[in-house]
Structure formats: C-alpha cells, structure tokens
Image (cartoon, helix red, strand yellow):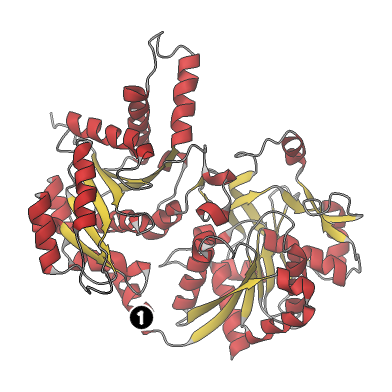
Amino acid sequence: MATKKRAKYIFVVGGVMSSVGKGIAASSIGKILQSRGYRVAIMKADMYVNIDAGTIRPAEHGEVFVGEDGVEADQDLGNYERFTNQTSLHENYMTTGQIYAEVIRRERNLEYEGEDVEVYPDIPKEIIRRIEACQGKNQSEITIVEYGGTVGEHQLFPFLEATRMMRSKNPGDVFVVLTSYLPTPSLLGEQKSKPTQRAVLDLYSVGLKPDFVLCRADKPATPDIKRTISNVCSIPVERIISAPDVYSIYDVPVNFEKENFGSVLLKTMGLPSRRKDMADWTKLANKIKKIQKEVKIGIVGKYFNFKSCKDTYISVIESINQAAWALNYKPKIFWLDTEKYENDKEKLKELDDLDGIIVPGGFGKRGTEGMILAADYARRNKIPYFGLCLGVQIMTISFARNVLKLKEANSTEFDPNSPDPVIATMQDQIEKIKNKNYGATMRLGAYPCVLKEGTVAANAYGKKEISERHRHRYEVNNSYIEMLEKAGLVFSGVSPDGKLMEIAELPKNKHPFYLGTQFHPEFLGRPLAPHPLFTAFVKACIGKRK
C-alpha cells in the first residue's frame, strides 16, 4: 500500500527590520509553487495580543482585511488572495491573543486533565495545532506560514519554538525562509550583510537554521554579498535570493523565478517540479511597466495623518490599479483630507482637476461633513463617484440633504439625535453597541445580493445575483427608502429578502457614475480579474478625462 505523503511547511520570518515585504514574499512563494502544480495555503501569525485585527485602528496597523467567513485579519491576507486567488478563512490567521485565549479556555474546561499549564510547551503546541488545522482545512501539500515581526523579538519566541518543535519531529518537512534587509550606507555606497548575519545568529540561538535568505534591498544583491552570507551562515549560495525593490509588487514572483528560486526551493524540499506556468502573470507584470496614459483618482478620506496611506487602503489601491491596468491606464492617486472642506468650501474646486473620486470605508464622525460636501459636489458637477461602505452612507446623506432638502439628515453613528436618520444602526447591532460588545460583532463576511435589471451595477456585473464581503454596523434606514427612490436615487442591489440596501446609484442618464456599495468590493479584486465595479468606475473616469 502506498504511503501517504506528508505535508510540507515553509515559515517566512523577518530579520533586521519589519515592513520589508514578508507578506509579498510569502504570497510570491505561494504563487510560484502554485504555478508548478502544488496545492498551497498561506497563513499569517501576528504577535499582538488582540484577538484579531478588527479592533485596531487602520492608522495604527493598516487595513483590516475581511475574509469570506468574516475573519477580520491582517492586510497580508489580502495579498495572499490577490497572488494565489484562494479564499482566506479563520484558519488562515492567528494571533497571540487567540493562542492564549484558547489555552486558557481549555484549562478552565479541564481539557489538560489537571496538569499545570505552562508557556512552554503548551503555547507552542497550540500554535502547531492551528498551523496543522490550516493545512487540513485547505488540504494543502505545502503550507506557508508568515510570522509578523522580526527574529530576536521576545513575542516571537513561542512561534519560533513551535517551528523548532515541528522541524525536530519531521526535519524533512519544515523549512525556514529569512527575509532580511541589506542596508546600503550612502557614504559607503555598498551593501552590508552584517545585520543579516546577526538575524541568522538570532535564529541559530533558538535552534533554527534558515534554508533560504531573501535579500531585500534597493538594488539586487551583489554576487559578493551572496557569497559572504553563504560562507558566514553556512547556506548554499544558490539559496541566497536577491529581492530588490521593483516597479510593482507583481514583479516579485517573476524576479524570484529569474533567480531560479522555484526550482531550488522544490529541490530543497525534495519535491518534483510538475509544471511551470506563470505566462499570464509575467505578461501582466511586463505590461504594467509600459503603460503611459494616466487617470487621476482622488481618495477622499481621513486616515492620512499617521501610518502610510497605502497600508490603510491597500485593497482599494490595488483594485484601482487592477482596473486601470486592464484598461491600459496607470492611476495617479491623490489623497484628499476632507476636514479642509468643512472650513473652506472653495477648496472643493480641486475635485474638478480629478477624473473621479472614491470615498472608502471608515468609522467615526471626524471628516464626514467634508465627505458629504464632496459627494454633493461630485453629484452636481458630474464627477465619477464611487462610495465603499461608509461611502454609500455619505452619498445617501448628501442626497437626502441636497435633493430631499432634509437639512439635518445624518447617520445615527454621527448624530444619534438626528431628526432624519437616513442611515441607522442595524437592528442586531443596537444591543451590541449598548453593551460595548465591539469585537467581531459587525455584519462580517460574504452575503448574497440581488441586482436590479438595467442598472449600472447589473450592467457592470453582467448577472442577477452576486456575493460580496461586508464589514459594517449601519445601513440605509428603510423608513426613507421610498422618499429617496421617488427623488431619483436607485437602490440597484438589495439583500435577497429585500430588507437591506446593498447598492445605491444614480441612473446613467443622470450621472456618468455615481454609485456606492454597503459592502467592500475591493476585497475581491484580483490582478488577472479586476472587480467589475472598479472597472466600470475607472471607465467612467477615463470618459471624463477624454
């Protein structure tokens, strides 16, 4: 009887400094292995004690990415999906908070049978259980696990110990990829490998040896640097992989293949290369560099003063990119903080220079009055407008105030005492908010939506029923729907039971593109399959530009 092949595991860890591209590296490894015929799964392990990313400010930690089953996760899961076109679920994400909460729950339920419960080995064992659960759920031949943070950080030790325990049990099935930064001091003008050597030493100190080193730098790693790292760290030179800055993140798998990374990786894992097909991906990566025509799009929001805007709105940005590239345009994005409009309406005229605007998701009152002004300006001046979650609420409030003349129309989130709450708290959310039950309690994950025939939304999708991902507590108040519709606002997408308004729009003969969604379409955009609503929006932007 044939022996069942054991699953393989690749751990992607960081060295020297954070935010140098571990998530893109893990995504690229998944793409390469997938292109060679292997079933892969990618998992993110975050070090913070939060249960999930849902209660962390976007300005603090970046975008909260929502999976199909409602998991509120790190933005890296979005990259995993965009690169591999695989759906992320709760099993693809874990945090230190989840690990400790589960171990404590099991202890309280006597599941440890009266034994004393300790950080070592019980915390690493729970980490291993979750990694293996991810592999089982996805039936993956190769599971890639990205660890947040960098080696040497105290909070990473239990995770590294879990990796050591897995490798000790099955040494031929567990591999470590170190993503490390090579600085180039400006006065010296040459790359330095000492910080990377130190990161390798940190791994050795916890009983692990990297199988590969990905050398992140502004330029390709030199042959001398590769030889130095190879000699000092006892790693074959062909496993020292150059990972320079690139034109777009979609170049990374292509560059890795130029380094023969896929072949060496499979050889190291003792696996055959079944096939190799990245033709469509390579074609896209090459196309992106050659596009010359620009389309100017403004993102109208408020999370612009802290962390990188790109981190906060990464899925929105990538969905814009994907749609624009498919239409042979490259987007030029402008960040517009709406608080300035509240103090000086004349500044709204800067919208005239744009081809279209997007109001993305967000929470809280700050900046919303400026967004409402921007939505009205875009409506009156025929500027393409695309509202995402909060954005559809903003356009509805703006329409109620300026078309229905309900001057105090608002959302109960911004003004609980508004006489005209055209946006109201969802019924199942009222008690949760009252009891401050905020974590993982919103309307989360994928829900079906029925489209109205002949509308902008239905024409964009080309079908009658869709499924999209949600993350919200508020919705269009059903008491105002008849009034809004009579005034010309079309609810072109609704829940199957007709109770929830999912898409609002103005007809094509009234506006080139004025549409908002209560869901987050940006979570389903893919490089080789742009989201239809983003494509329709960018087409309208190009039409205005012409």
| 327 and 242: which is toward the camera | 242
On the image, the x and y values in percent for residue 106 come to 46, 19
Image quadrant for the C terminus?
bottom right
Give the farthest residue toward the top. 114
Image quadrant for the N terminus?
top left
Q: Quadrant of residue 379?
A: bottom right
Residue positioned 78% across, 64% down in the render: 396
Give the side of residue 41 with respect to residue 400, left or right: left
Q: For mark 1, what is the residue?
A: 289
Give the side of residue 149 with respect to residue 321, left or right: left
On the image, the x and y values in percent for residue 198 come to 22, 50
Which SS class for mark 1? Answer: helix
Residue positioned 15% across, 31% down in the render: 3
On the image, the x and y values in percent for residue 134 come to 37, 38
Q: Is residue 326 above or below residue 493?
A: below
On the image, the x and y values in percent for residue 30 come to 30, 54
| 259 and 328: which is toward the camera | 259
Question: How many other residues sit within 10 Å of disc 1, few (<14), some (14-19) or many (≥20)?
Answer: few
Q: How many marks?
A: 1
Q: Is residue 165 something one can see in this rendering?
A: yes
